[in-house]
């Protein structure tokens, strides 16, 4: 399947989150990342913009009854930059996690200058 987007990791944040997960969760993360890479239109079930932070998106992963989120942004059109990931334990995405994603996104773009 051809890639529509390229995915990169900003520093170690996503990788640190990923290696802590079980094999089943990593498999599900890989499936969702493949959707992000290959689908022109990514279903909202898997990918959504954070309304309170311009340019910040969340990749949405469900494995069994557990919910995970990975923050990301777009750069140079088709480049998706992954930031922090976490297991979601409440209905709303925790404000501190959104702030962390926003901070990493700002840091990434400042380093690109």
Image (cartoon, rainbow, N blue to C red):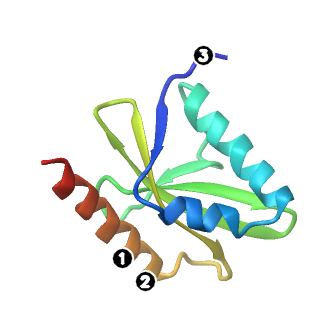
Coordinates of residue 46 in the picture (x, y in percent): 63, 48
Along the viewing direction, whichever of 109 and 89 lies nearer the viewer: 109
Tell me what residue is drawn at x 57 percent, y 59 percent: 15
SS of the residue under disc 1:
helix
Mark 3 / mark 1, whichever is N-terminal: 3
Distance in Å between CA atoms under marks 1 and 2? 5 Å
- Judging by the rendered image, the residue that carries numbered circle 3 is 2
**Picture coordinates of residue 32, whole percent (x, y):** 68, 44
> In this view of the protein, which residue sits in the foreground, 53 or 17?
17
Q: Secondary structure at mark 3?
A: loop
Q: Disc 1 marks which residue?
A: 99
Which quarter of the image is occupied by the N terminus? top right
On residue 70, the disc is none
Tell me the distance, in whole angstroms, between the alpha carbons under discs 3 and 1. 34 Å
Q: Is residue 90 above or below residue 82?
A: below
**Mark 1 burial class by Cα count in 10 Å: few <14, some 14-19, many 20+:** few
Q: Residues within 10 Å of mark 3 (few under 14, many from 20)?
A: few
Which image quadrant is residue 93 in?
A: bottom right
On screen, residue 65 above or below 29? below
Residue for badge 2: 96
Say which residue appears at 36% left-offset and 76% top-offset: 99
Q: Tags 1 and 2 in contact by the CB under 8 Å rule? A: yes
Residue 42 visible? The answer is: no
Q: Position of residue 85 (x, y in %)?
A: 56, 66
**Separation of disc 3 and disc 2 at Cα?**
36 Å
């Amino acid at each position: 399947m051809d890639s529509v987007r390229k995915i990169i990791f900003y520093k170690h944040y996503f990788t640190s989150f990923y290696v802590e997960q079980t094999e089943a969760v990593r498999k599900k993360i890989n499936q969702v990342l493949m959707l992000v890479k290959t689908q022109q239109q990514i279903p909202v079930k898997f990918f959504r913009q954070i309304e309170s932070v311009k340019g910040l998106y969340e990749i949405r992963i469900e494995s069994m009854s557990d919910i995970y989120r990975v923050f990301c942004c777009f750069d140079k059109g088709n480049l998706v930059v992954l930031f922090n990931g976490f297991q979601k334990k409440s209905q709303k995405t925790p404000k501190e996690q959104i702030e962390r994603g926003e901070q990493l996104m700002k840091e990434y773009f400042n380093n690109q200058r």
